Amino acid sequence: MSRLAIKICGLSTPETLGAAVRAGVSHVGFVHFPKSPRHVEPDQIRALAAAIPAHVKRVAVVVDADDAQLARLVETGALTAIQLHGKESPARAAAIRQRFGLPVWKAIAVKTRADIDAADAYAGAVDRLLFDAKTPDGAALPGGMGLRFDWTLLRGLAIATPWGLSGGLSIDNVAEAIRISGARLIDISSGVESAPGIKSVDKIMAFCKAVQPC
């Protein structure tokens, strides 16, 4: 069985980024969404990414971004993928992938099995799906709130598009999440923070260690 992929999302400092790399992550995520406590500007992403080894993939996370916003991110030369975390349609996702020439991920907000089934519409339009917990109506953020959904909904999932699991993961429950869902990529943000937007080096290291035996 191949090694599990780990993405630490919402990184914003050299110290925590370095910890993620040392801990063996496959992906790092930079949130470009002003309402988020994890928001970073394109210049910050460029500076942070300069210290990342080539084998670690660099993902920008955006929410219903327009082409001008996406262009500023892509022009940094720092990215290897764009993650869409808003209400982007399959057509919009496909258009972004075609225009900017980068792999596109789409976060799918999940509460019921119907939400997972609806992800089929993105087949052929995106390179990866990320199943995340659906936030309450009116919530300020579409993710990164530490919420989880019923992982058994993913059991035996048979789709052609590669996918990962996010939402409510922690050092204590990630092994269970992997066992139940069968996910081969794990994405975490608030579960390795000491406060909203403040990543913990110790928690990053502990989380990655908890994933490795799986």
Image (cartoon, rainbow, N blue to C red):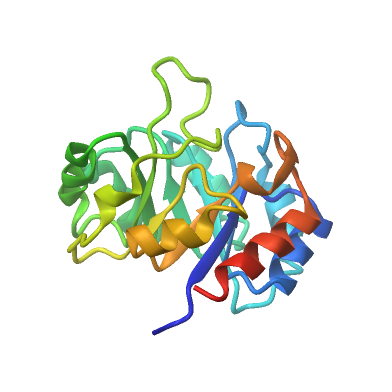
Q: Is residue 71 left or right of residue 189?
A: left
Measuring from the top left, give residue 214's x and y in whole percent: 49, 73
Residue 94 in sight here: no
Q: Total marks drawn?
A: 0
Q: Residue at x 73, y 64 (%)?
A: 205
- Which residue sits furthest top? 138
Whether 6 is drawn above or below 141: the answer is below
Q: Is residue 133 left or right of residue 24?
A: left
- Tell which of 123 and 118 is nearer to you: 118
Measuring from the top left, give residue 90's x and y in whole percent: 23, 45
Residue 70 in sight here: yes
Measuring from the top left, give residue 209's x and y in whole percent: 65, 69
**The N terminus lies in which quarter of the figure?**
bottom left
Q: In terms of image quadrants, where is residue 6?
A: bottom right
- Which residue sits furthest bottom? 1
Measuring from the top left, give residue 199's x and y in whole percent: 74, 47
Q: Residue at x 67, y 38 (%)?
A: 38
Q: Is residue 151 left or right of residue 200?
A: left
